[in-house]
């Protein structure tokens, strides 16, 4: 009887162990599924779903999964103390850090309806103050105790047809920090924008390479242009829309001293110009969606020899004689 009881007890314990293992396995699977779902939702939250695409080919460009997180730090303009972190200082005149946008609470606004000469003078002054403050703060603007950019001047009136405005002349650029390039990477760029001016702002994703030069202070490294991708925000109007582009730095054909080169860095450059008015940007994202071989540009062609031009006659003896 004791053996039978022991056998039954062992069977019961075994059954409970199997049930517990199955329960634990289900729990592990459930946890993994939950983690995957959360990851999917987190990734999906990067793209505010209620913002419509501006162009019909955009969903196709979104079909490839991102292989990286957003490489453009603070592309939603949410963090920062006096201006958006990881972007250049705003001048509070033509570039403004304001409430609104499609994701979060803030976005970047440009006003191109400012007299061109007034804006250029103020923007130069503001960026110099910002650069000096960044130097004092060792590149960390959030450590500054006070905002180094003062309040802007009162806007001077502009006159129709508004060719005197910054929108009718320079346009306004607003640039991100430099982003290290992944050689051979295929990139996707996404941005939300709107305007009440009826224009078509642009985004340039510019490439740069490091070059060492000699100055009066000794050797220093500067960044020089090495190709770019351009996205024109067509059909931009007062409603927020989303634009997408895919670009291939590996196929750029930049040269330096007749030698092919690939950029070392990328930089996002938001640009608004004509017609003069208000433009807003938000939720900018840069991500890798694949890799490819780097295409070397064709070897440079030797310059053609200059053809000697006939010299016009200057004396009577040089004119042809007709017989």
Image (cartoon, rainbow, N blue to C red):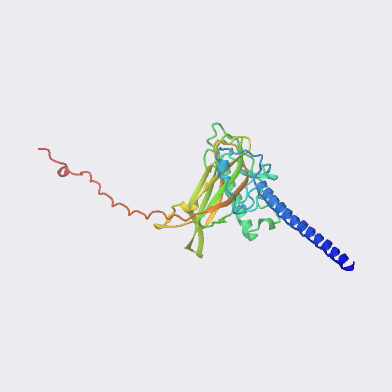
Q: Is residue 198 above or below residue 3?
A: above
How far across and down, in percent of the image, does residue 13 sit?
83, 63
Residue that sits furthest to the front in the current view: 1
Residue that sits furthest to the left in the current view: 323
From the viewer's perspective, tell me whether residue 19 is left or right of residue 162.
Answer: right
The N terminus sits in image quarter: bottom right
Q: Which residue is pictured at 82% across the width and 60% down the height?
A: 16
How many numbered discs? 0
How far across and down, in percent of the image, does residue 146 sit?
70, 54
Q: Which residue is pictured at 53% across the width and 38% down the height?
A: 168
Q: Is residue 237 above or below residue 132?
A: above
Q: Which residue is pictured at 70% across the width and 44% down the height?
A: 105
From the viewer's perspective, tell me whether residue 192 is left or right of residue 163.
Answer: right
Residue 102 quadrant: top right
Q: Which residue is pictured at 89% across the width and 68% down the height?
A: 2
Q: Nearer the viewer, residue 161 or 139?
A: 139
Q: Is residue 271 visible?
A: no
How far across and down, in percent of the image, does residue 70 sit?
62, 52
The C terminus sits in image quarter: top left
Residue that sits furthest to the top in the current view: 160
Q: Nearer the viewer, residue 73 or 115?
A: 73
From the viewer's perspective, tell me whether residue 264 is left or right of residue 27.
Answer: left
Q: Nearer the viewer, residue 297 or 267?
A: 297
Residue that sits furthest to the right in the current view: 1
Q: Is residue 189 visible?
A: yes
């Amino acid at each position: 009887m004791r053996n039978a009881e022991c056998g039954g007890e062992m069977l019961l314990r075994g059954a409970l162990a199997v049930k517990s293992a199955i329960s634990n396995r289900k729990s592990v699977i459930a946890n993994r599924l939950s983690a995957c779902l959360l990851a999917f939702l987190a990734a999906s939250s990067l793209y505010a779903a209620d913002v419509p695409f501006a162009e019909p080919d955009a969903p196709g460009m979104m079909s490839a999964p991102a292989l990286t997180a957003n490489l453009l730090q603070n592309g939603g303009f949410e963090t920062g103390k006096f201006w958006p972190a990881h972007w250049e200082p705003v001048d509070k005149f033509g570039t403004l850090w304001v409430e609104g946008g499609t994701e979060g609470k803030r976005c970047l606004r440009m006003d191109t309806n400012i007299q061109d000469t007034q804006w250029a003078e103020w923007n130069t002054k503001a960026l110099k103050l910002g650069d000096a403050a960044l130097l004092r703060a060792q590149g960390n603007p959030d450590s500054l105790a006070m905002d180094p950019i003062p309040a802007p001047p009162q806007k001077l009136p502009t006159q129709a047809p508004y060719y005197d405005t910054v929108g009718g002349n320079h346009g306004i650029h607003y640039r991100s920090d430099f982003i290290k390039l992944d050689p051979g990477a295929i990139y996707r760029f996404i941005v939300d924008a709107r305007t009440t001016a009826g224009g078509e702002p642009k985004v340039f994703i510019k490439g740069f390479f490091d070059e060492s030069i000699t100055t009066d202070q000794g050797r220093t490294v500067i960044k020089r242009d090495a190709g770019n991708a351009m996205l024109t925000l067509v059909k931009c109007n007062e409603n927020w829309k989303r634009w997408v582009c895919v670009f291939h730095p590996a196929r750029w054909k930049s040269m330096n001293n007749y030698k092919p080169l690939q950029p070392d860095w990328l930089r996002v450059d938001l640009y608004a110009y004509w017609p003069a008015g208000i433009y807003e940007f938000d939720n900018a994202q840069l991500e890798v969606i694949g890799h490819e071989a780097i295409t070397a540009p064709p070897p440079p062609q030797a310059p053609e020899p200059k053809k000697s031009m006939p010299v016009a006659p200057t004396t009577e003896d040089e004119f042809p004689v007709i017989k």
